Image: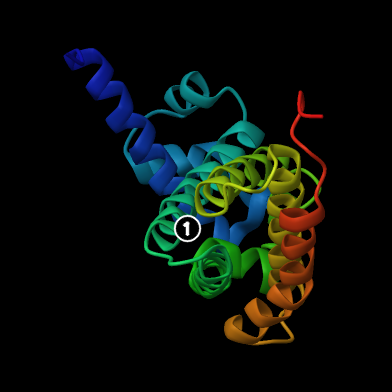
Amino acid sequence: MTSFTERTKATLRETLLDAAADLLPDRGHQGLRMADVAAKAGVSRQTVYNEFGSKAALTQAVALRVAAEFLDGIRCRFEDAESLLTGIRGAVVYTIEHARENRLIAAALGTEAGEDLLPLLTSRGEPILTASAELATQQYLALEPRLTADAAALLAETVVRLSLSHLVLPTHTASEAAESVLAVLAPAIDQFVHNGVKREGQS
């Protein structure tokens, strides 16, 4: 059973993440002050440092929480899908629509204050990209067991990076973006399924 102390610590962490998430869209990473996060959460600045250690770690934790919420939504899209392509289409549409509506991500992509948040989605966002790709790999294998693990991982990473590119350069609707991703992925999936490299240990 979770102890009272553990529950209190988890609640404190969520409160601090909520405060930072509210402040980041307007201020960006550079403009975010730990003292302001503390004031908004009703705690001391030292409490924020004790929990996260640094502003960079706090910002990264906010980004990871946002990613976790997206991952739950993506998982649901795959669980409801009748096929791998249907699942990919639903996951891409969901990701792009909700990312564009999310205040934090919208700030990173569309405001001067949020420009320094963009690396959390791209070059410094490796933990987020990795988590997304790992979840997608599992879902791909579940929906299309004929894929090898390596093929599923490659396809998943490709979808994640293509989706990210549509977020960073939003020239299409979410549905259009999903169709363009499928145009690239469908032939590759077919090739992997019918002509792919055999699983390790197979002759």
Against 70, is 150 above or below? above
Against 153, is 83 above or below? below
Give how far across and how far down residue 129 sits, in percent. Answer: 68, 46
Front-lying residue, 149 or 153? 149
Q: Residue at x 39, y 56 (%)?
A: 79
Front-lying residue, 161 or 12? 161
Front-lying residue, 86 or 196? 196
In the displayed structure, does residue 147 sit left or right of residue 63?
right
Question: Can residue 115 be seen here?
Answer: no
Element assignment for label 1: helix
Give how far across and how far down residue 17 sits, in percent. Answer: 43, 42
Q: Residue at x 68, y 70 (%)?
A: 167
Against 134, is 67 above or below? below
Q: Residue at x 48, y 44 (%)?
A: 65
Location of residue 188 by image quarter: bottom right
Question: Can residue 179 be seen here?
Answer: yes
Q: Which residue in the rendered view is the most extreme toward the front?
A: 203
Q: Residue at x 39, y 41 (%)?
A: 39
Front-lying residue, 99 or 76? 76
In the displayed structure, does residue 140 sit left or right of residue 194?
left
Specify the quadrant that holds the C terminus.
top right
Give how far across and how far down residue 38 sits, in percent. Answer: 42, 37
- Name the residue carrying label 1: 74
Specify the quadrant that holds the N terminus.
top left
Location of residue 61 by image quarter: top right
Applied colour scheme: rainbow
Q: Amino acid at mark 1?
A: Ile
Location of residue 42 by image quarter: top left
